[in-house]
Amino acid sequence: MSGIDGLPPLREVIATHELSARKSLGQNFLLDLNLTAKIARQAGDLSGFDVIEVGPGPGGLTRGLLAEGARKVLAIEKDQRCLPALAEISDHYDGRLQVISGDALEIDPLEHLTPPIAIAANLPYNVGTELLVRWLTPKEWPPFWTSLTLMFQREVAERIVAQPGSKAYGRLAILSQWRADARIVMSLPPGAFTPPPKVSSAVVHLRALETPRFDANAKILERVVAAAFNQRRKMLRAALKGLAPDIEDRLNAAGIKPTERAEQVCLEAFCALARQFET
């Protein structure tokens, strides 16, 4: 029996329901329930929260979130083979688990949830970054979520928390750190998963700020940052020349040397540059 909730161990669940991980769905299962419970704890006190989980698979993290006291878990699962195993968890937890079958990129979960809302997931590798960008760029801020506790490939996690001057620093760091506190809270080796991926993984915790760190129009900031890092080896006066004919003047007005490259420019300076495009 498992140590966290009395349900069968995950290896037994996988064998019973014939749930071999599928590469086409970006699946790598975590089978250690102590580990999934530890990941759930990184989300903080969930007792008053509804939690969205994307890609629960056989339900290891799902069980951790429920055992740690989540008020409700809404699990979105594309792989229909996993639904019977998740139904068993829902029955065990008296309906605190609701499962939606479908693609997380196409589903609006909010009609099923009551704030406050947290998101916690071992994200499928093939959609993880796209989902994060969507959650960080809603039409209105603050967003519907209070926090994100997400597992990524280690390389993606390092891009989220990267600082200026590093090779990992780029658009993802700007988007994450402008509106949230972001930190890596756990690291996991390939051997923790079945099947083992080729790379290490890490859990990132992001807590939404009430207001962005620095004033800027979101769409303008995204456009400026995208243009700067799309040609990150070029000086900014060249990388951004397509945005405005007087780009050197705008860079100088924002306190940025036109000869600098994108990876040298801090978040505050990028926001200052974005404001130069508002006039």
Image (tube, rainbow, N blue to C red):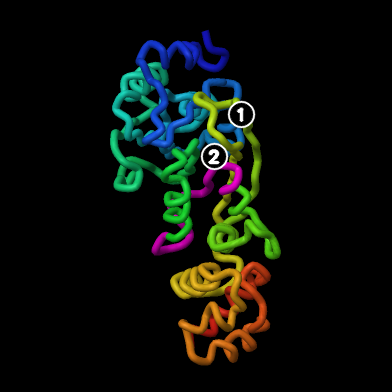
Question: Is 155 in the magenta?
Answer: yes
Task: Residue 35 in the image: state x and y as whole percent.
Answer: 60, 25
Which label was assigned to residue 38?
1
Task: Residue 16 in the image: state x and y as whole percent.
Answer: 38, 11
Contact between labelled residues 2 and 1, with CB atoms less than 8 Å apart: no
Q: Which quarter of the picture shows residue 75?
A: top left
Vertical placement of 123 versus 18: above or below? below
Q: Inspect this view and state whether residue 72 appears.
A: no
Residue lying at 31% horizontally and 41% vertically, measured from the top left: 103
Vertical placement of 209 versus 75: above or below? below
Q: What element carries label 2?
A: strand
Q: Return the residue at label 2.
A: 151
Which mark's residue is nearer the viewer, 1 or 2?
Answer: 2
Residue lying at 54% horizontally and 71% vertically, measured from the top left: 231
- Binning the other alpha carbons within 10 Å of mark 2 as few (below 14), some (14 to 19) or many (20 upward) gives many
Using the image as rendered, state which of residue 102 and residue 66 is in the foreground: 102
Using the image as rendered, state which of residue 227 and residue 179 is in the foreground: 227
User: Over which residues does the magenta segment extend?
Assistant: 138-156
Q: Inspect this view and state whether residue 232 appears.
A: yes
Vertical placement of 44 versus 146: above or below? above
Q: How many angstroms separate mark 1 from mark 2 (CA)?
A: 12 Å
